């Protein structure tokens, strides 16, 4: 069915990521360009249920392309997981005349959009926004590039202390289910070891590798650990393990936490957000629904939402090998 869309809602959902504001700006301006009304929905699905809406015109999104976080706020909604919650949201959309929406978020947000669109037939389009880069159907999610740069900068600073005091640092970075951040910053910041959810290198191997580093003349070391790494031990437990099994190092731990999600988006993320917003609006106009916009080989693509949610974004295992060679 070809749908004539008159008013598009846009919202951010799940964890915020740098570039979300640039994407909101792009959706709003692409709507203005195509003479379609645009409405900002505050606090994700929570705000949809409550009818927390505000009309947005081209000028209302000035000065946000360079801002981290999301001006529309974000939330994870329990109520939207229920049929009653989704019915309330639908009634609010109808009341406001919103006949399609763009959701900027991760797989949980896309699952919600998919169910909603199946139940109520509203056209939906997803823009992948998460620093984790864990969405199938795009080589880059919004905020990932910025997070990589933020984390590399932080590790560079920690290295100053590590080398001044001859210490071993375990640095925890975000990435519950995938090791994209850990793997890339590990190589980018010259870490001795990288622990990720996808590969279990084993604790014995870790100790052995750290011992070899020491013997080869290294006085300090950095080990980057993804939140969800396969050893099943968090950074504090890893410190205890090394303390018990190696006397060679003085060990410290640093958990970078939410600072990784903040800050001004990189140029890459601003450009990506601008392209994704335009692609999302124009895809809705041309009758597409239930898809996510993505980047593949520098081309904007559409991936069905169910594939984006079910598919696995794969890490580049070659980077592990490169890291091993670099840390000789
Ligand atoms: O999905 C993005 C992410 O930052 C993960 O890397 C992290 O595990 C999680 O969100 C943290 O979520 P919250 O902000 O709810 O603590």
Image (cartoon, rainbow, N blue to C red):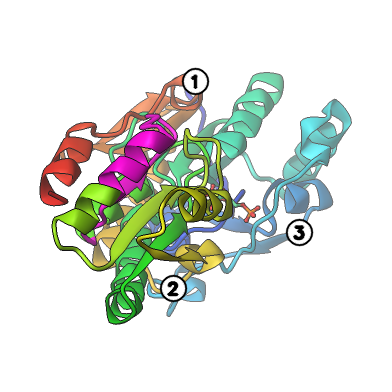
SS of the residue under disc 3: loop
Q: Indicate whether 257 appears above or below 299.
A: below
Instruction: Verify CB contact (< 8 Å) between mark 1 and mark 3.
Output: no
Q: Residue at x 55, y 44 (%)?
A: 103
Position of residue 252 measured from the top left corner of the image (x, y, whole percent): 47, 67
Q: CA distance from mark 2 to mark 3?
A: 26 Å
Q: CA distance from mark 2 to mark 1?
A: 30 Å
Specify whether 328 is left or right of 32.
left
Magenta-highlighted residues:
189-210
Q: Indicate whether 232 appears above or below 160.
A: above
In the image shown, does 146 or 242 lie closer to the viewer? 242
Label 1 CA crowd tier, 10 Å (few <14, some 14–19, many 20+): few
Position of residue 142 measured from the top left corner of the image (x, y, whole percent): 39, 52
Q: Residue at x 27, y 75 (%)?
A: 163
Position of residue 285 measured from the top left corner of the image (x, y, whole percent): 42, 37
Instruction: Verify CB contact (< 8 Å) between mark 2 and mark 1.
Output: no
Q: Indicate whether 317 appears above or below 79.
A: above
Please give the residue where the numbered disc 3 appears in the rendered image: 52
Give the number of the mark in front: 1 or 3.
Answer: 1
Please tell me the numbered disc located at residue 310: 1
Asked if the residue at label 3 sits under 8 Å from ligand 1, the reply is no
Q: CA distance from mark 1 to mark 3?
A: 30 Å
Please give the residue where the numbered disc 2 appears in the rendered image: 263
SS of the residue under disc 2: loop
In this view of the protein, can residue 34 be seen by the observer?
no
- Magenta segment includes 193: yes
Displayed quadrant of residue 73: bottom right
């Amino acid at each position: 069915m070809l749908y004539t869309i008159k008013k598009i809602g846009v919202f951010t959902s799940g964890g915020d990521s740098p570039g979300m504001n640039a994407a909101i700006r792009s959706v709003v301006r692409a709507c203005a360009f195509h003479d379609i009304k645009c409405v900002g929905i505050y606090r994700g699905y929570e705000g949809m249920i409550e009818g927390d809406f505000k009309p947005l015109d081209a000028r209302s999104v000035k000065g946000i392309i360079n801002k981290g976080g999301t001006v529309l706020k974000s939330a994870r909604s329990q109520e939207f997981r229920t049929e009653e919650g989704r019915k309330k949201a639908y009634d609010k959309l109808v009341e406001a005349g919103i006949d399609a929406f763009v959701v900027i978020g991760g797989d949980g947000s896309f699952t919600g959009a998919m169910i909603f669109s199946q139940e109520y037939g509203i056209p939906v389009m997803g823009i992948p926004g998460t620093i984790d880069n864990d969405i199938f159907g795009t080589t880059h999610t919004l905020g990932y590039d910025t997070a990589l740069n933020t984390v590399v900068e932080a590790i560079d600073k920690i290295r100053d202390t590590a080398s001044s005091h001859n210490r071993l640092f375990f640095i925890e970075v975000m990435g519950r289910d995938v090791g994209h951040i850990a793997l890339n910053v590990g190589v980018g910041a010259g870490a001795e070891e990288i622990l990720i959810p996808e590969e279990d290198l084993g604790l014995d191997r870790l100790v052995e590798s750290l011992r070899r580093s020491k013997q080869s003349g290294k006085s300090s070391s950095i080990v980057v650990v993804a939140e969800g790494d396969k050893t099943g031990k968090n950074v504090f437990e890893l410190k205890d393990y090394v303390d018990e099994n190696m006397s060679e190092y003085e060990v410290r731990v640093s958990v970078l936490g939410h600072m990784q999600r903040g800050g001004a988006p990189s140029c890459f993320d601003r450009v990506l957000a601008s392209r994704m917003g335009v692609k999302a609006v124009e895809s809705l106009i041309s009758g597409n629904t239930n898809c996510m916009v993505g980047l593949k080989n520098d081309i904007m693509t559409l991936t069905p939402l169910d594939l984006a949610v079910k598919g696995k974004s794969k890490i580049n295992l070659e980077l592990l090998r490169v890291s091993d060679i670099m840390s000789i």
